Image: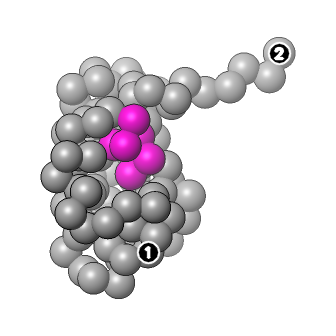
Amino acid sequence: MALVSPREAERVAALLLGWLAEEPGRLGGFLSAAGAAPGDLRAAAADPAFLGFVLDHVLADESLLMEACEGAGLAPETPARARAALPGGDAPHWT
């Protein structure tokens, strides 16, 4: 898996957050999962940990992931690569 810089990972997550926000139903589900209000998004979007949650949310549902990647013009593997570059995104080692 190719490495993604933290800055690029934040850009990918912000792009997907924008995609989520385009439709009230998608945004409502995300906000409910995040425990956030619409007015919180602008400030939260500057927080790398919150952006990691955006990626976690999209990655948790394969159909949402595929729809989001298509809508945002991303390859399906891009969100997982981006997630690895943000806080809390390192893959567990089961050795």
Residue type highlighted by circle 2 = Thr
Q: Position of residue 13 (x, y in %)?
A: 29, 46
* Local SS, label 1: helix
Residue 53 falls within the magenta-colored stretch: yes
For the C terminus, the quadrant is top right
**Residue 24 sits in which quadrant?**
bottom left
Q: Is residue 6 something that shows in the picture?
A: yes
- Image position of 75 with respect to 5: above or below: below
Q: Is residue 62 something that shows in the picture?
A: no
Q: Is residue 48 left or right of residue 60?
A: left
Task: From the viewer's side, name the closer residue of 72 and 55.
Answer: 55
Q: Position of residue 2 (x, y in %)?
A: 39, 24
Q: Which residue is mark 2?
A: 95
- Identify the residue shown where x is 44% and y is 27%: 87
The segment highlighted magenta reads: 49-54
Q: Is residue 32 left or right of residue 4?
A: right
Q: Which residue is mark 1?
A: 29
